[in-house]
Image (tube, rainbow, N blue to C red):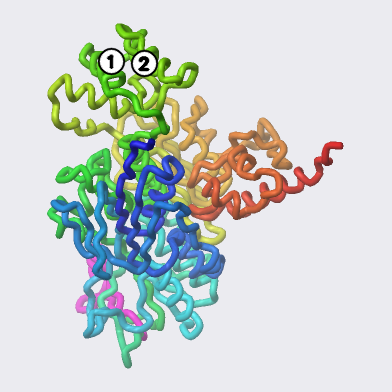
Amino acid sequence: MNLRVPVKVVVVGFGMVGSRLVDELLRREPEAFDITVLGSEPYEPYNRVLLSDVVAGRTDVAAITMPLPDGARVSVRRGVVAASIDRGARVVHADDGTVHPYDHVVLATGAAARIPPIPGLRTPDGGLPAGVHALRTLDDAREIVAATVNSPRAVVVGGGVLGLEAAVGLAGRGLNVTLVHHGEGLMERQLVTEAADVVRAGLEAQGVTVRPNSLSSEVLVAGGRAVGIRVRDNGAAAAARASAAPAGAAPRDEVVAARLIVFSVGTIPETGLAAAAGLTTDRGVVVGYDLASPDDPRVHAIGDCAQPPNGSRGLVAEGWDQARRLAEHLVSLVEPVTPVAVLSPVAVVAPVAAAAAAGFTGAAPAGAVAGGVAAGGTGLAGAGLAGTRPLAHLRLPGDGAQPSMAVRLGALLTSGATSSRAQTDQGIDTRGTDVVKVKAGPLSVTTMGVCGPSRPDEPAHRSIRLADPRAGRFIEVVVSDGVLVGATCVGDARVAADLTAAYTRRTPTPLDPAFLLLTPVMAAAAPASSPEHMPEDAVVCRCNGVTKGDIAGACPPGAHSVEDVVRETRATTGCGSCKDAVCGLVDWLRASAEAIPEPA
C-alpha cells in the first residue's frame, strides 16, 4: 500500500519564477504534489528577459516561450487571477469563481511597471495614451514592435538596464531614439560615473541621443495619441545651468517630438493579494530566509514580489535560485514512500520511539529497525525484506536524508512536543545570481557583486581600475581574501566572460589582481578549436549552470536536438546569449554520433 498523501501546492503567478518552481518540484518528486497554477496572463510562460530582444528584432515571439509543465498532478489555469487568500480555511479564491485548497501557497506574482504621475500620461479611464508603453509583458513588446512601423522617432524614459536595451533595440530598427534619464550617469545602481560615461559614448555611437539629468514633466497628447514629451533639467543640473545662464534666463524646458514613448523607470512589486490576506508587506511581500511569511509558514513568496532579509535586485537568476531553494524545502517536508506489506505498529514504532527517546542522532543501533526488535527477533528481516536497503519512509537520521515520519512521530510521542520548530534564519549565499549583463548590441556591459557608487567601503576590499574612455573601455575589479568579490566591465566582452567565471566559481585571483584587467597576450593554453577539446565541466549556459557534460548527457543516441537539450537542462532559457554555443555543441554531438560506425 502507499501511505503518501500528495501535498497541495497553489502557485499564484506563471511567469519565469513561478513556472521554474513547478519544474523544480516535478524534477524532484513528481508524484508528491498536487500543483495548481493560477496565471493572470493567457499565454504559455515566456522568457521576460528576452522581451528587449523581441523589440530589437533579434528574437521572434515564438522563440521566447517556455515549456509547459508536464505532469499528471499539475493543473495550469491561464488567464485566471487569484482574487483572495483565506488563510483560515487554507483556500485561494480565483476571479472565475473557482476555489483552490492548499497546504502551501506560493506567491510569484512578480512586479508591475512603474508609471510616474506626470501630466498627460493617463487617459480619463486610467489607461495610457496611444503610443505610450511600458516594457514588462509580452503584450507590451508586441505593441511596441507594431508602433515602430509608423513612428520614426522614439523616446525611452529611464537609463537603467532595460531602458538601455530598449533604446539600442529601437535604434537598431532605424528609429531616431532619445534616452531621457533623471540621473547624471546611466545605470547608477551598477556603474560609477567614469563607467557610465563610457556607456553613454557607446550608446551615442549607435545613434542614441542621451539626455542625462533630465526629467519628463509632461506627455503631449493630440487626438488621443502621444506626439512628444516635455523635458526639463533635474535638480543640481538645473541649478548649475541657472548659475551659468544670464540673469533672467528661463531654465531649460523643451519638447522632444516622438510618436512612441517607452517608460522604463522601475517596477512595483505586486503585494495587493498578500496585504489583503493580512500578511506583512513593505516594498514587497516580507519573507524570511526560508522564503515563508513571518505571519504564516504555509505562505511563501519568491521572485520580484518577495522581500527577503537580504533584499532583492529584481534579477531572474535570483528568482530562480529562490525557486530552487523553496522546492528543496517543500520536498523535504514530503516522505518518499515505497509500497510495503502491512506491519504491526509495535514492530516499527516501538524501536524508533526508543531510539528517539535515547537521543539517537547517529547510525541505527543493532537490532533497531534495520534488524528488527532485538528482544523478540521479529522485524523487517522477518517480514521477508532481508537484504534490501532501508525503506525510505523508515529512514533514521544519518542516512543522508530527512528524518522519516516514523522517527518524527516517535520523537513527538516520547517528548510530548506538539509542534515543529521553525527553520532557523541563516544567511544565504547569492553569489552568481547578481551578475548583470546588458544586451546593448556591440556594446558589452557586465557588472557583478560589489560594484557601483553605493558599494560598501570595506577595508579588506582591494580595488583596481582600468579607465580607457577613448577606446570605449572601463574595467574595475574588487578583490578580497584572494577571490573576486565584484567587477565592472564595459567594452571588453572577453574580459567580462573571464571575470564572470572567476566570480561565480570563486577561483583564486592572481597575486597581482591587475592581471584580471586584460586578456593574456600569450594565453597559457590555446582556446578550444573544437568542442572535443572542451573540458566536461566547461560552463556553456551561465544562467542555469549548464556544462558541456550536462548537454552531452541530455543527448542520448537518436535524440540530438536543441529542443531536447533545452527541455532537459534549461540551457538558453535565461539571457539567451548561449544559444549559438548550445546549437553548435548539439551539432557537434550529432556529427560525432553519426561518425561512429555501427557495431558489426
Q: Position of residue 557 (x, y in %)?
A: 70, 44
Q: Quadrant of the N terminus?
A: top left
Instruction: Tell me: residue 223, above or below residue 359.
Output: below
Tell me the SS state at disc 2.
loop
> Which residue in the structure is indicated by mark 1?
351
Q: Which residues are magenta?
A: 227-254
> Which residue in the structure is indicated by mark 2?
379
Image check: 475 left or right of 245? Answer: right
Instruction: Tell me: residue 218, above or below residue 138.
Output: below
Circles 2 and 1: CB atoms closer than 8 Å = yes
Q: Nearer the viewer, residue 301 or 11?
A: 11
Instruction: Tell me: residue 487, above or below residue 425.
Output: below
Q: Position of residue 585 (x, y in %)?
A: 67, 47
Residue drawn 36% across the image and 46% down it: 33
Residue 115 seen by the camera: yes
Q: Residue lying at the far right in this picture: please name it.
A: 600
Q: Position of residue 254 (x, y in %)?
A: 31, 80
Instruction: Tell me: residue 17, above or below residue 164.
Output: above
Q: Residue lying at the far bottom in this picture: please name it.
A: 223
Q: Nearer the viewer, residue 345 or 241?
A: 345
Residue drawn 28% across the image and 33% down it: 427
